[in-house]
Image (cartoon, helix red, strand yellow):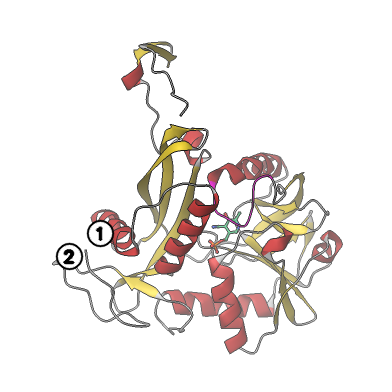
Amino acid sequence: MVQLQTPKFVYMGGKLRLWEDATLHVGCEALTRGLNVYEGVKGYWQVDGRFGIVALRRHYERLRRSARLLHIPCDWTYEDYESATFALISELVQPDRDMWARTTLFVVEGHWGEGTVADLVITAYHQDKQPPQPVNLSVSTWRRSVDVALPARIKTSTNYQVGRLARIEGRALGCEDMVLLNQWGRVAESTGACILMVRDGVVYTPPPTEGALESITLDLVEALAKSMGIPFVRRPIDRTELLIADEIALCGTLAELPLVKSIEGQRLPESAPLLNALQARYFQAVRGIDPHPAVELAMLPAPDGRMQAQEANGPARSSV
Ligand code: PMP
């Protein structure tokens, strides 16, 4: 096995430091866009006063799949993952503010894939309760990487290098997010969300084989659309179709479902009846106002350690 040397000194932050003291914070971009797999999970205050995390088990399962592809060991069971997430959120949560948690499996030891050791690090951030504001979108000159290089279907931070560059490009254009095209010049996804497009009463989104993450929110939204009688189709989308779409929205755990108000500087109609209706239904489901079987919520245990009550959609999960 290749052995990484540990020389006595490292130059860092303008001076020489001991090897052991040359550390980076887990929240810094060098690490959050580095070698790890992660999940972003969102928790919402429910109408009944409980706090529910959306699709936590599905996020855990995707984390395991991402880790498997990158040969990163994941020794945490779902129960460990849930307990750790609950413990941090319980400590930080504030009344009337939702939370987004980043659950990251960092590679902390190993070299070129030998002797890999991982650690689960969870950071959680407060989120305002307002629905997302409409965004301006343009098509980036940067492209989604190909499946044989940095596979977009899994959630690994190294994929986000290109998203970072696209956002820098978008900022100069007044765009909050940017569309990444794939190697065939078709729509893949945005820098941090999937893309929904409506044409003639049908919602379309590109499948992961077009270079999109295997999105959990997309599956939930598809189930909601089907219950509402809205046709929902996954198929490749040309760039020019997006430019003449009737309605566009982004779709993701953190992004939620913001409508797109302009694409490449051209305004879209404000009404957006289908995507507005889907957005409203999504919030009713994640806030427990009108639960949907596809939108499972893992309820935070009450402070005394008991579950707050039965889950909105299914049996209570283990408590901390
Ligand atoms: N694509 C990218 C690049 C993302 O970062 C996200 C957010 N996780 C999504 C799509 C949407 O995925 P999900 O619905 O699972 O959050």
Depth check, front residue: 54 or 113: 113
Identity of the residue drawn at 38% across and 74% down: 297
Q: Say which element carries label 1.
A: helix
Q: Which residues are magenta?
A: 149-156
The x, y position of residue 209, in whole percent, is: 71, 62
The three-letter code of the residue at mark 2 reads: Pro
Q: Is residue 71 visible?
A: yes
Instruction: Left or right? Give the position of 90 relative to 139.
Output: left
Identity of the residue drawn at 64% across and 66% down: 259
**Ligand 1 under 8 Å from disc 2 Cβ:** no
The three-letter code of the residue at mark 1 reads: Ser
Q: Which residue is mark 2?
A: 303
Mark 1 or mark 2: whose residue is earlier in sequence? 1
The x, y position of residue 147, in whole percent, is: 69, 52
Identity of the residue drawn at 50% across and 53% down: 68
Given contact means CB atoms under 8 Å apart, are the residues at marks 1 and 2 in contact?
A: yes
Q: Residue furthest right?
A: 240
Q: Is residue 94 visible?
A: no
Checking the image for residue 90, the label placed there is: 1
Q: Quadrant of residue 239?
A: bottom right
Checking the image for residue 317, the label placed there is: none
Above-or-below relation of 165 to 201 = above
Instruction: Please rate how many residues cluster around mark 1, counting C-alpha atoms within 10 Å: few if below 14, some from 14 to 19, many from 20.
Output: some
Query: Mark 1 and mark 2: span between their CA atoms?
Result: 8 Å
The x, y position of residue 42, in whole percent, is: 43, 62
